[in-house]
Image (cartoon, helix red, strand yellow):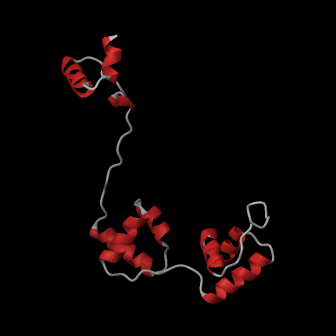
């Protein structure tokens, strides 16, 4: 009973602390059951230089993140810190015209995105800025 109440008491911190000191079981998840934290290993200067070279050669940020085992924002931060001009992906006016035409013919956003080498969300945003009404996932007008 005391063990059960200890888990819900306002003094749970001190209860658990005393139990740890006494070598007793503590309420809540056991240390063995806890997930290990991700370890952070920063990129070396050589890796950052290689990353910048690959980016300048046209490799996408997402691909660099996978290759170097870091998050894509980490890649972007390294590029910005080293004053590498970032490529802004998106659709130019001609591609937006093409996307509008294809969408009005019935092509889904994903297929248009694949054809224009961008994400479907990018296509949707471009259509939205042009005022094109979108369809639901079943092809019906919204």
Single out the residue that lies furthest toward the top.
1
**Residue 116 appears left or right of 37:** right
**Residue 31 appears left or right of 62:** left
For residue 100, above or below residue 111: below
What residue is at 49 percent from the left and 75 percent from the top?
59
Residue 127 location, quadrant: bottom right
What residue is at 43 percent from the left and 76 percent from the top?
54
**Residue 85 appears left or right of 107:** left
The spot of residue 48 in percent (x, y) is 33, 71
Residue 124 location, quadrant: bottom right
Tally the numbered discs.
0
| Residue in the foreground of this view, choosing between 45 and 10 | 10
What residue is at 70 percent from the left and 77 percent from the top?
132
The spot of residue 101 in percent (x, y) is 75, 82
The spot of residue 112 in percent (x, y) is 70, 74
| Residue in the foreground of this view, choosing between 42 and 134 | 134
Quadrant containing the C terminus is bottom right
| Residue in the foreground of this view, choosing between 3 and 94 | 3
What residue is at 78 percent from the left and 78 percent from the top?
104
Quadrant containing the N terminus is top left
The spot of residue 92 in percent (x, y) is 59, 86
């Amino acid at each position: 009973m005391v063990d059960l109440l200890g888990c819900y008491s306002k003094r749970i911190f001190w209860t658990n602390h005393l139990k740890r000191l006494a070598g007793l079981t503590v309420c809540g998840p056991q240390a063995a059951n806890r997930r290990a934290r991700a370890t952070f290993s920063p990129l070396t200067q050589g890796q950052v230089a290689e990353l910048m070279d690959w980016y300048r050669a046209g490799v996408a940020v997402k691909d660099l993140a996978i290759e170097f085992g870091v998050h894509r924002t980490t890649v972007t931060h390294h590029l910005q810190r080293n004053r590498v001009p970032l490529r802004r992906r998106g659709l130019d006016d001609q591609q937006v015209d093409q996307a509008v035409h294809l969408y009005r013919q019935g092509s889904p956003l994903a297929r248009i995105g694949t054809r224009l080498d961008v994400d479907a969300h990018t296509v949707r945003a471009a259509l939205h800025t042009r005022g094109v009404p979108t369809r639901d996932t079943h092809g019906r007008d919204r």
